[in-house]
Image (cartoon, grey):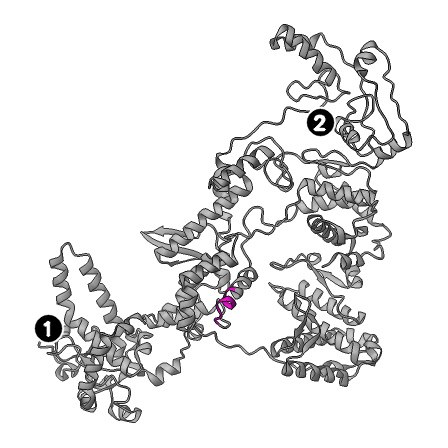
Amino acid sequence: MSAKSLSQLYVDRPDREGRDRLEILTALIAAPPLDALFRESVIRIPRGHPVYRWECVVEDCARTRSGGTDMCTAHLDQWRSAREAGTGRAAFLTEAEPLDRHIWADQAPCRLCPGRPAVHTQWLLCQRHSSRWYYHRKANGPDTFEEWLVGEDSFVAFGGCQVAVCSSLAASPLGLCAEHEARYAREGRPGGASLPDSWSHRYEQQGMKVPVTCSDEPAFRAWCASTFPVPRPGQINLRGIRPLLRAEIQWSMFAHTQQQRHGRWDVGWVQKLVNLARERDAGSLTDLDLEDFPRFHTNIVKRMLHYLRLVYFTPELSREAGFIETEHFGIRFPHRASHVDLTAVPQQWLRNLLWDYLADLMRSAHCPRTALPVDAARRGITELGAFLEVDASGGAHDPAVLAAEHMQRFVADQRQRARDGLPSLAMKTPDGKPSTVSDTTRSIVFNSVRKVMREAMDTGKAEHLGLDREFITAIPFAGGAPLRARRPFPDEVARALADEANLTRLADAFDPEDSGLRDAWEAIVLTGRRVNEVLKLRWDCIGHYGGLPMFWHDQTKVGNYDTAIRIPERLYDVLAGRQQKTLDRFTSRHGRRPTSTERAHLALFPSKVRNPDGTTSLSYQWFHHRFRKWVADLDLGRPVPHQARHTLATSLLRAGASLTHIRRYLGQISDRMAEHYVHLTQSDLEDVLQHVWVAGPGTASPGELLTSKSATALTREQAQSLAIDLTRRSTPAEGGFCTFQPVVDGGACPWNLDCHNCDKFVLSGADLLYWRRKREHWRLLAEGAPDDATADYLHRHFEPTARAIDGLEKALGGLGLLDDALALDLRKPQDYFHRVWSTAFRATDLADAGSDEQDEYSDTCTADDNDPEQDVA
């Protein structure tokens, strides 16, 4: 919200039961919960304050931050040199040595005469005693300091500094502290106030009063009344400003310390803000014109006004002023401000209906988790109000003049704007341009207006306003926006989004501060997690368990918390590198490494906005904005990050995972949702997937195709005519089926159940996953063999079976059924009577049907296997 609109909220002073704003703030400031240090007119922030830290970030350094940075001048110079030498900030802060305070003038009284300021922090002596000690030490040595103190007398004080806002002691009879006396000389000594030369020797040490001359005393007094206070470490001087303004700053500074996510308010920035307000003689923060304020101070004032708005306005007063504060209801939506402006609705009665609807929504037991319902209601009522302002007589400020035709014209107008892509009457884009009405926004507007109006009718508010019932019932129910399943990334898009050069550009051009954009994207691609599941990772989200890299995350959408999945070592290394960068960022901010407790609560991808403890993660909006600009730069169309999840699901399906495996890995609530992600339905399985048989590993030609791979070899009608009922012609065996009829009829096996070496043993599409796992098992055994001879033996022993598996895959691929077969895992007993395996084909019939193209197919397979371009693809 702009400074101008903020000021408009305070045009009329709101009263609360007869008390004005100063009385309200005075009561709050005097209440026990407020920290006592904020009650003083000179606020002195202690060292190590968690919000208003003013000392150097180097651990145990006693010096003050310089120029809005977080280091003292000495360490800042050292850091510049270290940075040029290639040293990182975290490493520099870890190795930097703390420094003692400067041994110069400080805000401390002399130990012998408390009415005079000390000029040396080591000895704590005023100027006169410091001179006396200098000559004594020169004559007698420094070891006699305590003895010298006993014999010294106290001198008469000069009183306080005459500058109206200064709380320091005067350093001379001129009545100014040392800093203001130096400033007075730099500014040309307005009024000509001065002391005689050598005044201490000529007058004070002689017991005489020191004369002060002044050519224009009113000018000197005016300078004392108008000059700024001297900057002090950790000190905010509120003297000389109006009482209400002082109370507002005191309360706002305390309220700022109570926020979980507080931005940085440097003590020097706040003091500069006070000085500007004092210079303009502002009575309140609301009197300040922020147009010419520096950016930092403008942001601080806006935040202060927000804290004050929660105090000045009750919910009822905010209703009259045209806004609603979610914090009045104890709610703060994620990544959203508490203030919701409703003044874009022109009609007061319509704005009040919207306010009442939102208030009831936030008071209800079903309060939304996000601000989307609030935004939808505000958008719908704003669109309606803007239309009525130009369509109805008198701008429809009297609800009694509205009838059904007004709502019908509004509905027609919205539909036309959505159809023709016309701009909205009220809504604006972030750059100030009119928003375009679409079918989605039209649906949101209709449904939200219907909800607000129906609630007004149900609660009797519409009748009280005199609003026609037909006006309310004329708004139609638009239904939900059509949901379309996201497609997996096309191959060319997937390659572009994983290209190393493109990923490097993603990090360099769209995440120059290295907040983790590329690392988060790689984690999304490789794990298939939702975007927020990756962005909300905690620091300790990875680890090796039993030698396997594991990835721990929360699947909040389905209620699965602290869930682990296995990840590749490459991704583990990427996230481990991000862990180190996150620790370095914490060290750079705090000057120390986090404790074990702090480390456990750190976000792996911490936000840089109002996140001092590093526990708040990057937002989805931050990620999506930069991802969208990267995709636009690559000219890839409009892919979205969530498509990576669909792509991984489809890849898992092709690799042999079942729907149950996919559902468990992706963290979905049902097989139906898993089907949505892999674009596969149960009807597809029942209507398409059939069993294709090949010769078993014990035959003379293992893996020999008993049907042609070509999809044109058999029509669907031919395949149906060859189908037989497998349950009556075979019996299940390990990894396949036995077709030896004596065994099928219940007799004993003459080969002692040596199925895998039997020519009566056949394989089906339902057995593909079993044999793929078997092949991987033998490969692992061969790779782990103690010598090459053993490995060669294992490979030769399993070679017939491997050829059979290859033949089965070629057969399924020829009929276009390979992907469907890889989605099955039907070796459970309860699945044996399912139609998907019981429908099969006699191998001899299939062999006869495909015999004409067998030779041609074999040549094709050989060419394909040796095609280098195919391997590359």
Q: Is residue 788 visible?
A: yes
Report the number of discs.
2
Q: CB atoms at circles 2 and 1 under 8 Å apart?
A: no
How many angstroms separate mark 2 from mark 1 (CA)? 101 Å
Q: Which one is in front, 74 or 816?
A: 74
Kind of residue at disc 1: Asn
Mark 1, residues whose alpha carbon is within 10 Å: few (<14), some, or many (≥20)? few
| Residue lying at 77% horizontally and 25% vertically, measured from the top left | 169
Q: Which one is in front, 129 or 254?
A: 129
Residue 520 to residue 768: above or below: above
- The region drawn magenta spans 630-636
Residue 239 to residue 870: above or below: above
Quadrant location of the N terminus? bottom right
Q: Is residue 594 visible?
A: no
Residue farthest toward the left in the current orientation of the protein? 750
Q: Which numbered circle lies on residue 107?
A: 2
Kind of residue at disc 2: Gln
> Is residue 119 found inside the magenta-colored segment of the image?
no
Residue 480 to residue 842: above or below: above
Q: Main secondary structure of the magenta part?
A: helix
**Could you tell me which secondary element the residue under label 1 belongs to?**
loop
Quadrant location of the C terminus? bottom left
Q: Quadrant of residue 590?
A: top right
Q: Quadrant of residue 273?
A: top right
Q: Is residue 722 left or right of residue 288?
A: left
Mark 2, residues whose alpha carbon is within 10 Å: few (<14), some, or many (≥20)? some
Q: Which one is in front, 471 or 632?
A: 632
Tag 1 residue: 752
